[in-house]
Image: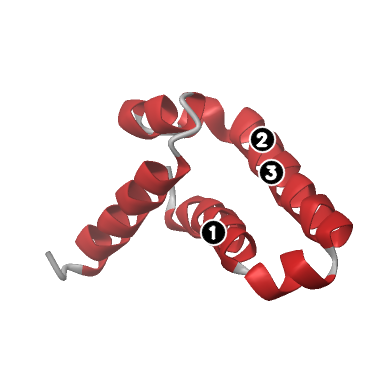
Amino acid sequence: MNEPTHATLAALLEKRVQLIADHALRERDAAGHLAALREVSEAIDAFYASQKPHLAPRLRHFMEQASYAKALEFLKGAATEASGNT
């Protein structure tokens, strides 16, 4: 998988983490919070479906199991390796 694809998937996963952590939004607008989570989850699913054949087997495993935190860690590790900062 190429670097732009890694960056796109990582950005979607990070957005999901940020939304989950946004307690103020959830308290202020529960329906909006849920809609935003649904939107990013659908974007993650669509991206995964389109890129699945190009993903590393371990990353596919994490995505298939909805282990998004592990997928994000994997992607961050891959980015670090690609930049030579291991």
Rendered-image quadrant of the C terminus: bottom left
Which residue is identified by label 3?
41
Q: If you read the primary sequence from the N terminus, does the residue marked by circle 3 or circle 1 appear first?
A: 1
Which residue is identified by label 1?
17
Q: If you read the primary sequence from the N terminus, does the residue marked by circle 2 or circle 1 appear first?
A: 1
Label 3 CA crowd tier, 10 Å (few <14, some 14–19, many 20+):
some
Residue 13 location, x and y as percent?
54, 53
- Mark in the foreground, 2 or 1: 1
Tag count: 3
Which residue is identified by label 2?
45
Marks 2 and 1, how far apart in space? 15 Å
Label 1 secondary element: helix
Question: Are the two marked residues, 2 and 3, in contact with CB atoms closer than 8 angstroms?
Answer: yes
- Mark in the foreground, 2 or 3: 3
Marks 2 and 3, how far apart in space? 6 Å
Question: Are the two marked residues, 3 and 1, in contact with CB atoms closer than 8 angstroms?
Answer: no
Residue 45 location, x and y as percent?
66, 35
Residue at 71% over, 36% down: 46
Residue type, mark 3 in image:
Ser
Rendered-image quadrant of the N terminus: top left
The answer to which of 75 and 41 lies nearer the viewer is 41
Residue type, mark 1 in image:
Val
Residue at 40% over, 43% down: 71
Task: Judge whether 79 appears above or below 69 on screen.
Answer: below
Marks 3 and 1, how far apart in space? 11 Å
Left or right: residue 14 versus residue 75 is right
